[in-house]
Amino acid sequence: MKDTQKSRHGWSWWYLLFLLEFAVAIWPPFYNKVDPTLLGIPFFYWGQLAWVVIAAIFNAIVYFAMED
């Protein structure tokens, strides 16, 4: 069973995408504004929702980049 599992050690530059996700989520002044609005929805709401989609894309990029 150990032969089929490969251990992933080390650090990769791809992990910086996780740091970017974390920095945007933890820094409210980035998205705490009303303008621009999208269909009458303030940026505070649609910006966070858009960031969820962007973060999912970043996670997929890291996953496939690190896949052996």
Image (spheres, grey):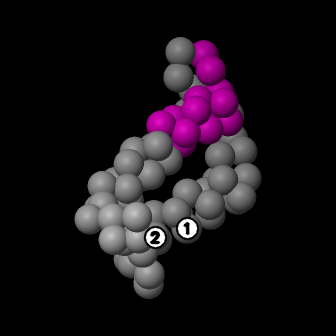
Q: Quadrant of residue 6?
A: bottom left
Residue, x 38% and y 77% (percent of image)?
Answer: 13
Q: Which mark is residue 15?
A: 2
Neighbor class of circle 2 (other Cα within 10 Å; few <14, some 14-19, many 20+) is: some
Disc 2 secondary structure class = helix
Q: CA distance from mark 2 to mark 1?
A: 7 Å
Amino acid beneath label 1 = Leu
Q: Quadrant of the C terminus?
A: bottom left
The answer to whether mark 2 and mark 1 are in CB contact below 8 A is: yes
Secondary structure of the magenta portion, mostly? helix
Residue, x 30% and y 61% (percent of image)?
Answer: 67
The correct choice, above or below, for 58 with respect to 2 in the image is above
Residue, x 58% and y 32% (percent of image)?
Answer: 49
Span highlighted in magenta in the image: 40-53
Of the two numbered discs 2 and 1 in the rendering, the one whose residue sits closer to the viewer: 2
The correct choice, above or below, for 22 with respect to 2 in the image is above
The correct choice, above or below, for 32 with respect to 23 in the image is above
Which residue carries the number 1 mark?
19
